[in-house]
Image: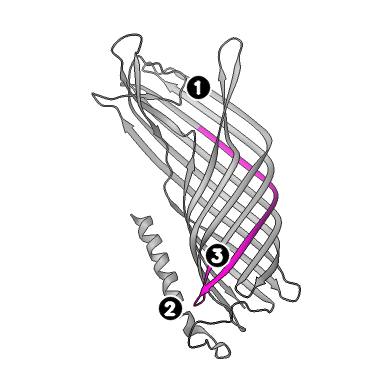
Amino acid sequence: MKKGLFALAAVSTLASSTLCARELLCEQCVPEPECWEHLFVERCQWFVHGEFLYWGVAEGNMDYAITYLVGPNLSAPVIPLEYKIADYDFCPGFRVAASYYNCPKYWEATAQYTWMHNDGKERVSASDSVLLAPTRIDTFTFTSSANSASSKVELDYQLGDLYVARVFDPNAHLRMRLYGGITLGYLNQEFEAEYQIGDSSQNTYNEQWRFFGGGFRVGLTADWFLGCQFYFTGRVSCASLYGGYKNELLEQSLDGADSLTTINTKYDDPRFAFHTQFMTGLSWQVPCDCWSFELFGGYEMNLWFNLNEGIYFSNTFPARTQYYQSVLGLHGLTLRLTYGW
């Protein structure tokens, strides 16, 4: 509830800024009585950008328990009902940037930083009619039901970009920027699950992976004039990063006799990760000879590939290693306020 009120307050503040933007115009930049036709100011300018992010996380392979029924005979001892998935909440974040536009050469240089922390908690309990089984521990068998299961997930997301754009004006109502540069990314995720089995047996599962790498990014932005200083604004970019990936798994089982069993697995390797970004929405822009202003609101989607790779070792002969991978996605509301001078 508090997060929802915080997002509503941020939207209200930005909306009120648009109402008083015309009053802040300097005397040299008086608007026309109707919609302005002065779309793009052709002069060198500095810009600062501040963005409010309200994103959620979507990710596969995040099950931690399953509900089931005992079958009518030994040939069908277990009837699965529903998988319980560790889920993220929508959380606030930010992105800040600074850029310089060189008008005579039609190029623009930008430095940008993005930060986001997402988390979430889930819990499920068994009942008289529905039994419960963990899916994240190796020592459990379907001879009894777990009393309860809970999950907790956290993701730290940091991304830095430094790129140069070539600015194009294909016609009087359209501006495009084709850009490319370097990017750095740091992602750290922790996945915890706890299970209460019987009166005194407790099992815990903790998996943490992190990736840090750098690479190159290319992208395209567009501002299409609609009327009355409103624009349809979009961005698409993709990046390939090379870096180090590390995964640590700690599994512990404590039985009624205080006997502790621990499984601790670690591995790390270098790898390539691929990131794509899509953003679209409406912007209200006030281009001026003395200063410029922009307010943008839209939807953004970020997809990461070749991350969150887990390894399970099969304790059979011959021994086999099993891999699983899933796509990591961040998406939600993006609000941007830009000031240029």
The residue at the far left in this view is: 128
285 shown above or below 150: below
Q: Nearer the viewer, residue 203 or 68?
A: 68
Residue 219: in magenta span: yes
Residue beneath disc 2:
19
Residue beneath disc 1:
262
Label total for image: 3
Which amino acid is tagged 3?
Thr
Residue 8: in magenta span: no
Which amino acid is tagged 2?
Leu
Q: Which residues are magenta?
A: 207-233
- Counting residues from the N terminus, which is met first, the one under dot 2 or under dot 1? 2
- Say if mark 3 contacts mark 1, CB within 8 Å: no
Mark 3 or 1: in front is 3
x, y percent for residue 251? 49, 25
User: Which numbered dot is residue 233?
Assistant: 3
99 shown above or below 35: above
The residue at the far front in this view is: 171
Cα–Cα span, label 2 and label 1: 61 Å
Q: Secondary structure at mark 2?
A: helix
